[in-house]
Amino acid sequence: MKKGRPWKTGAAALMLATLLPSGMGSADAALTEVPYAMDSSNQAGWWTPLETYGTGLEYAYMAYNAPGSAESTHKVYIARRDGNGGWSNIPVMNGSSVAEYSDDLGHNQPSIARDGSGRFHVFASMHHEAWHYFRSDTVGGAPQNHSADMPTPSTFKGTYPVLTTAPNGDVYLLIRSGEDAAGYRSGQLFRWDNAASTWSKVAVIGSSLNKSFYPDDLVFDANGDLHILFEWSAFAASPLRHELSYVKYSPSTGSFTKADGSAVSLPLTPGTADIIQPLSPTEAYVQTGSDPGGPGVQSAKLAVDSSGNPVAAYRYREEGSTTFSVKYASYGVNGWNLQTVYNASETKAAIDITWAGSVPRVYYAKSSGTDRAFMAAPTGGGWSQTSIAPGKPIERLSVERNENGVDIMYLVDVTNRKLYYGRN
C-alpha cells in the first residue's frame, strides 16, 4: 500500500543500512544519494514531492528544487529512479526554459502526482501567487506549463498545493486560496479528470472569517473515498496553527462526512469541522509573521488503516512546553485517540506517516544531533524510535508506501545540499 492508498551530478550512489526494531516484519532500510545537485531552498513541511509507481519493478519520482542561475533562485526538476535503480533528471519546463523561481523557504517548493495515463502533474513555487502548474504532454515526458488550464478566475492566488492520485487515475489537488479583501483564505479542492484531461473545482472545503486554511494531506482508501487533513491559523497567516481537522469526501456520492460518518456542510469552519486536536485552555489564534509561542499545531500528515479509518501524525506544542512534540491520532469507536510519539527534544517541520499492514509508522526529524531522521512504531504501551539515516543531518522528509509494501523515503540534507532516496 502507498501512504493510505492501495495500488499511498554524477556522484556515485552512497548506500547505507540500519536495522529496524525486531518484530517490525521489514527488511533493512537503505539510502541512496540522488545524483543531482539540490538547492538549499528544497525544504518544506506541507509538500507532496514524492510519487511512486509499479509492482515488481519500483519507480520513484522526486520533485525538487535544483540550483538556479543565482543563489537566490532555484530551478524545478524531477529526479526519476527507474525499476532497475537507474537515475534520470527530468526538467519542469516553462516554455523553452527550465522553470525558475525565487527562493522562499516553506512556500516555493514543488508537489507532484502521476495520473493514470502516466503523465506528471507538478505545482511549484506558489506563495499567494497565480498558478504555476506543469503537466506532461506525453507519458513520462518533461512537464510543460499548463497554468491556463486551471478553472479559476484570473485573480486567483494560491499557496500550499498538495496532491494525490485516485484509484481510477484522477488527480486531486488541495490548495489554499487568498481572498484577502474579504478577510479569509479558504481551502479549495480540485480534480483532474484523467479520462477527459480536464480540471474542475470540486468544492471550497473550508472558509471562515478572520481565519486561514492550511492544507496538510490527501489520501485515498480502498473504497475510493478521499481523506482530507488540514489546520487553521489567524488571518492572514501564522507559523503557529490550530485545530487540526479532518473530513472525508466520497466522489461516488459527492458527500462530505466526519470520521464517524455524520454529514457536514461546506465550507467547513473551525466550529463545524471534525477536529482532531482541539484547542488547549491557553491556546489562542494570533496573527504574526513569527512564532508567537504557546500551544499549537505545525505540520501534519495522513494515512488510512487496514479498515479504512484515518490515522494522522502531527507536531504539536503542548501547554507549558517550548518544543514541538510528535503526536499520533487514530479514530475508533470512542472517537479520536491521541498519543505522544516523541517529546524528548525539539523537532523540525518534517513529518509523515504510513500504515504498515497492522501498525502505523511515524516519520519525523529532530532539530539537532548526529542522527536526526527517525521512524517510530508502537511497541507494547509505547513507541520505539529507529534512526533511518545514521550520521545524516536530515531536516525535511516525505514518505510513501508503494505497491510492493515498501516505504519509499524522500530525505533532505539541507546543510550539505543533498537529497536521498530510501527504502524501508
Image (cartoon, helix red, strand yellow):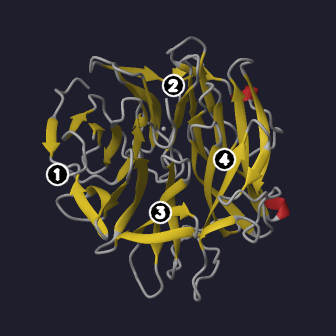
The reply to whether callout 3 and callout 2 are in contact (CB within 8 Å) is no
* Front one among 63 and 305: 305
User: In the image, residue 176 lies at what x, y percent?
Assistant: 68, 51
Q: Is mark 4 on a helix, strand or loop?
A: strand
Q: How many labels does the image show?
A: 4
Query: Of callouts 1 and 3, which one flags the residue occurring earlier in the amino acid sequence?
Result: 3
Q: Which of marks 2 and 1 is in front?
A: 1
Task: Give the number of the disc on residue 314.
Answer: 3
* Front one among 390 and 378: 378
Q: Is residue 45 above or below residue 240?
A: above
Q: Residue, x 60% and y 73% (percent of image)?
A: 288
Q: Residue, x 46% and y 22% (percent of image)?
A: 91
The reply to whether callout 1 and callout 3 are in contact (CB within 8 Å) is no
Rounded to the nearest whole Å, what is the CA distance between mark 2 and mark 1? 32 Å
Q: Is mark 1 on a helix, strand or loop?
A: loop
Task: Give the number of the disc on residue 92.
Answer: 2
The reply to whether callout 2 and callout 1 are in contact (CB within 8 Å) is no
* Front one among 112 and 218: 218
Whether residue 414 appears in this view of the structure is yes
Q: Is residue 322 above or below residue 172?
A: below
Query: Of callouts 2 and 1, which one flags the residue occurring earlier in the amino acid sequence?
Result: 2
User: In the image, residue 263 lies at what x, y percent?
Assistant: 79, 57
Rounded to the nearest whole Å, what is the CA distance between mark 4 and mark 2? 20 Å
Question: Which quadrant, please, contains the N terminus?
Answer: top left
Query: Of callouts 4 and 2, which one flags the residue occurring earlier in the amino acid sequence?
Result: 2
Q: What residue type is labelled 4?
A: Ile
Task: Give the number of the disc on residue 405.
Answer: none
Task: Give the number of the disc on residue 390.
Answer: 1
The reply to whether callout 4 and callout 2 are in contact (CB within 8 Å) is no
Q: Which amino acid does label 3 sit on?
A: Tyr
